[in-house]
Amino acid sequence: MITASNLENAVYEAHRLAATVLPTDVRQAFERMHQRETEALPQRVMHEILDNVGIAETDQRPICADVGVPRLYVVVGDKCALADGFVEFERAARMATAQITQDLAMRSNRCHPLTRENPGHNVGVFAPNIEYRFEPDVDWFEITAVHKGGAFGSDFRMLVDGDGIDGVRKGLLDAVAEFGRRGLTCPPVMIGVGLGGTKDQAFAIAKQAAQLRPVGDRHPDPAVAELEDELHELVDSLGLGAMGYPGTGGYATDVHVEIAYTHSALTPLGIHQLCQAARRAVIRVNDDGSLETRDVPAWFSGYSRREGLQ
Ligand code: SF4
């Protein structure tokens, strides 16, 4: 049985790792980009980014002074048993978020949108956001903490049939040109594209695609995987490097596309860019209460992308 105390420890640890340790796949992608870069300025920037990542991990300090917006993605095993229930998990998640804010001296970014009153612990109305999904035949409870920064770089548009794939290409290039070339997205970024579903779904799956899939991962649908490769090449062909400076190292660590079945005449398009402080950490709580650190979230699976009636 998994207790509320196990879950509070897990959320705390997921937040601590997200804030201070860059995921291995992202760090390795940055190293490759640094090696590929031939222009002096973005090469220097990549060097500083990698240096900063090392210091954050060693000194246990947030990767960026802007700690982003802490949020949680939870995959609940269909066979998992919570001794204290889900409401106790949500209480534990709020307590752990406040505690890590204090312990790591993280900036409290969450404030009241009208009064701007800031409680000082990154917890408040609908904060931290928690998204859930279920996974069949497993008994664990997996928590992914993401501290997403980057106020810029997100976009949405409604495509009609005639727009076709060109509409996707144009939408993505417009978003990169608008924000990325001015350095406002703090590149290198991980790009998530959400295609289809309803408007809110397109936006949500784009964000999940940017945050919850590792560099190099490809969608199981070959047509979507081909589009991911093409869009990545397209974005990098703009000649932007680290922080938007002209360069050869690349703008995006990767482009991930998620699809959802949509209205037959319309295709919503959502775009998100996860900045160089790509803060993502996964802790799985096993049925005996033990915690396990994992590299890649189980958020996307054959089950979550299922088709058909059953
Ligand atoms: S976009 Fe990312 S790297 Fe840039 S200031 Fe915000 S959190 Fe930091």
Image (cartoon, grey):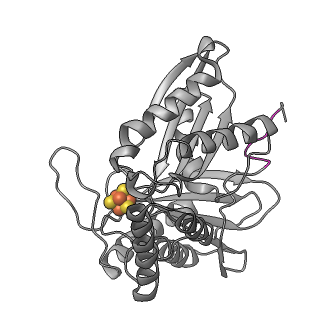
Which quadrant of the picture is home to ligand 1?
A: bottom left
Q: Position of residue 251 (x, y in %)?
A: 50, 51
Is 257 displayed left or right of 116 in the figure? right
The residue depicted at 40 percent of the width and 76 percent of the height is: 52
The residue depicted at 72 percent of the width and 65 percent of the height is: 80
Evaluate whether residue 200 shows in this view.
Answer: no
The residue depicted at 56 percent of the width and 60 percent of the height is: 86
Q: Main secondary structure of the magenta part?
A: loop
Residue 296 quadrant: bottom right
Q: Position of residue 11 (x, y in %)?
A: 51, 71
Is 23 displayed left or right of 65 in the figure? right
Q: Position of residue 19 (x, y in %)?
A: 43, 72
Which one is nearer the viewer's eye here, 228 or 61?
A: 228
The residue positioned farthest toward the bottom in the image shown: 58
Above or below 109: residue 151: above
Q: Which stretch appears magenta? A: 302-307
